[in-house]
Amino acid sequence: MNAIVGVDIAKDSFEACLLDEQGQVHEASFPNLLKGIKQFERWLKQLGCGKAHVCLEATGIYGDLLAETLHKHQHPVSVVNPARIKAYAESRMQRNKTDQLDAALIAVYCRTQQPPLWTPPPAEVKALRALVRHLDDLKQEKQRARNRLESQRTSSPIKAHLDEQIRVLDKQIKHTEYLIHDHINQHPDLKRCDDLLQSIPGIGTLTSSLIMAEFGDMTRFDDVRDVVAFVGLNPRQNQSGKKRSTQGISRMGRASLRAALFLPALVAKRRNPRLKAWAEQLERRGLTPKQATVAVMRKLIHLAYGILKSGRPFDPNYGCAS
């Protein structure tokens, strides 16, 4: 039985819980920086575990450096959807929640469930991910500048500065969008996936690039339900005694992907005859327009997974809605 380490990742630090081969538990905290990862590896060696199976949640950018560095140093690494960890905690009736308890839970999950090993995405996907996330940062900064401009009532110099800042950001956004488009065109695998994704009514260049950047190879998932959970669009179940109900979505996955799919879902409700009819049917059953839009977001994920898995573009005559 090899040593298992559960890691709970935060922006500035990560908590580690090691279960050694004798069943002993060791806990420590480290800064979420390269120096902290080096400290973590020295800690493993001090405990006699030069190589350990490290398991962490898929938390986006905060866990990237740790996962990639450990993989490079030949540690087995598993990156698990947070929804799976949450469901496992509920199955164990764990009510309390702290960073150390979360790390311990992830370690036990890794030992009992034996999640698959993780491998880093190809270099071209990592480069695309960096560009896509940079574009999102620029757009958020532009929105903040616009908000400050709208709230600025008196100072003309400040308004002029904010106007100039917005003009600069507009140029950077346009250039970054060009870089994304050019990068995709330079890599045949990305271009093929981009063409397939954009064959789906409602999905355009920016949504396609975000899907490719954040998912990497979507076909690595064995089941489309895992893909839906990765985005956080899986239904949130509420169980109390004999009563069971569904209350919205889990929101345990990538918020950026959920945000990116909202407008495409609105477009698909208008332009895709089958999805339009299906959404209208859901609303007649009692769903609100927003709930029907979320259902269409899930359907777009199903379609994206299906066409990437099959390698065939979207067929409007195929019975995609049910």
Image (cartoon, helix red, strand yellow):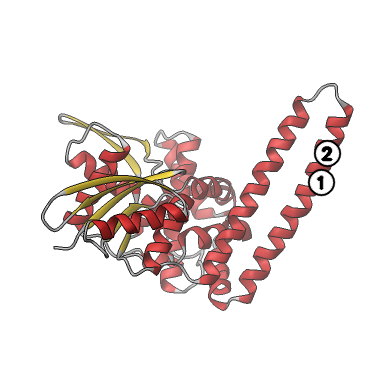
* Marking on residue 167: 1
Residue 8 or 206: which is nearer the viewer? Answer: 8
Residue at the (55%, 55%) spot, across then down: 272
Give the quadrant of residue 51.
bottom left
Check the image and name the residue furthest to the right: 156
Whether pointer 2 and pointer 1 mark residues with C-beta atoms closer than 8 Å, the reply is yes
**Spatial separation of the CA atoms under disc 2 and disc 1:** 6 Å
Instruction: Tell me if residue 196 can be seen.
Output: no
- Where is residue 166 shown, x and y percent of the image? 78, 43
Q: Is mark 1 on a helix, strand or loop?
A: helix
**Which amino acid, mark 2?**
Asp
From the viewer's perspective, is residue 252 above or below residue 68?
Answer: above
Amino acid at circle 1: Arg
**In the rendered view, does 300 fall on the left or right side of 85?**
right
For disc 2, the neighbor class at 10 Å (few under 14, some 14 to 19, many from 20) is: some
Task: Please give left or right for residue 110 compared with residue 188 in the image.
Answer: left
SS at badge 2:
helix
Instruction: Tell me the crowding category of disc 1: few under 14, some 14 to 19, or many 20 or more residues within 10 angstroms, Cα based.
Output: few
Residue 284 showing in the rendered view = yes
| Residue at 53%, 75% in the rendered image | 189
Q: In this view, does 17 lie to the left or right of 313?
A: left
List x then y, in percent, for residue 201. Answer: 57, 58
Spot occupied by residue 286 in the image (x, y as percentages of width and height): 41, 33
Which part of the image, by quadrant, shows the N terminus? bottom left
In the displayed image of the protein, which residue is found farthest to the bottom? 188
Q: Residue reaching furthest left? A: 22
**Residue found at the very far top of the displayed protein:** 154
In the rendered image, residue 317, in percent from the top left (x then y), is placed at 49, 65
Task: Identify the image quadrant of residue 178.
Answer: bottom right
* Most foreground residue, 48 or 82: 48
* Residue annotated with mark 2: 163
At horizontal 37% and vertical 54% (from top left) the residue drawn is: 39
